[in-house]
Amino acid sequence: DAKTTQPPSMDCAEGRAANLPCNHSTISGNEYVYWYRQIHSQGPQYIIHGLKNNETNEMASLIITEDRKSSTLILPHATLRDTAVYYCIVRVAGNTGKLIFGQGTTLQVKP
Amino acid sequence: GAVVSQHPSRVICKSGTSVKIECRSLDFQATTMFWYRQFPKQSLMLMATSNEGSKATYEQGVEKDKFLINHASLTLSTLTVTSAHPEDSSFYICSAQGGTPRLAFTDTQYFGPGTRLTVL
């Protein structure tokens, strides 16, 4: 599975959009980009995933560049409860596709 | 949908005893379950992958005789930490993925809330 690079930490003002970047320059054509987050002392929570098209759900939007070498997770209106570690993971679809967690980005939403 | 539970949420045991942790998919049948371990201030590390009715596949460096995994049904997997020692104290998290009833994303892993193990 391809590796990802994320900034170790970011701050965001409450109510503002949080834009979390991820680089995955070695991604393969059959690898998806997944985003999870982990709030302190809890299991990771699935946010969103995509292959090459931009995706949006009730939690967030995922913007993937045309060359698929990077992506951005957007939380449109961050709240204090969005403070967490956000993990960007690339993974081959299917049961053998493991999730390999890096260090992620610690997002601190401030009032 | 896609709810995964773990039991217990916390356990404290004496060194040398065995501890069993249960992972259940509550509203879907999981073809595959995964077990992770997380030490303080570190990221999750995959320990093993298990498919229902098959032997688990362990990651390099994980002792299969120490961490026994049983995936007896499509909704239940158990992790038993045998002869636990203080260095086994950690946060153990399971995840499940699968396809019945068909979830929107059958290849997506959904995680349990984790089990905090403390070995004295």
Image (cartoon, helix red, strand yellow):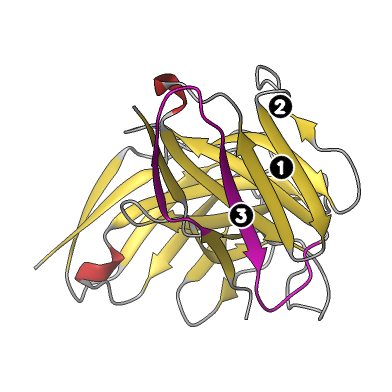
Question: In this orientation, which residue lies closer to the viewer: B98 or B120?
Answer: B120
Q: Mark 2 points at which residue?
A: B59
Residue A92 is a magenta residue: no
Give percent across and percent down for residue B70: 77, 45
Q: Name the residue under label 3.
A: B22
Say whether mark 2 and mark 3 are on the same chain.
yes
Residue located 53% across and 48% down the image: B93
Question: In this orientation, which residue lies closer to the viewer: B30 or B9?
Answer: B9
N-terminal-most mark, 3 or 2:
3
Give percent across and percent down for residue A95: 83, 51
Query: Which mark is nearer the camera, 1 or 2?
Result: 2
- Asked which quadrant contains residue A48, the reply is bottom right
- Callout 1, which amino acid? Lys
On-image quarter of the N terminus of chain A: top right
- Label 1 and label 2: CA atoms lie apart by 11 Å
The crowding category of the residue bearing disc 3, from other C-alpha atoms within 10 Å (few below 14, some 14 to 19, many at least 20), is: some
Residue located 72% across and 60% down the image: B76
Question: In this orientation, which residue lies closer to the viewer: B50 or A3?
Answer: B50
Give percent across and percent down for residue B103: 75, 77
The answer to whether residue B71 is above or below residue B98 is above
Q: Is mark 1 on a helix, strand or loop?
A: loop
Chain of the residue under the numbered disc 1 shown in the image:
A
- Label 3 and label 2: CA atoms lie apart by 20 Å
Q: What stretch is highlighted in magenta?
A: B7-30
- Callout 2, which amino acid? Glu
Res B46 label: none
Residue located 38% across and 54% down the image: A20
Res A98 label: 1
Give percent across and percent down for residue B61: 66, 17
Left or right: B103 in relation to B54: left
Chain of the residue under the numbered disc 3 shown in the image:
B
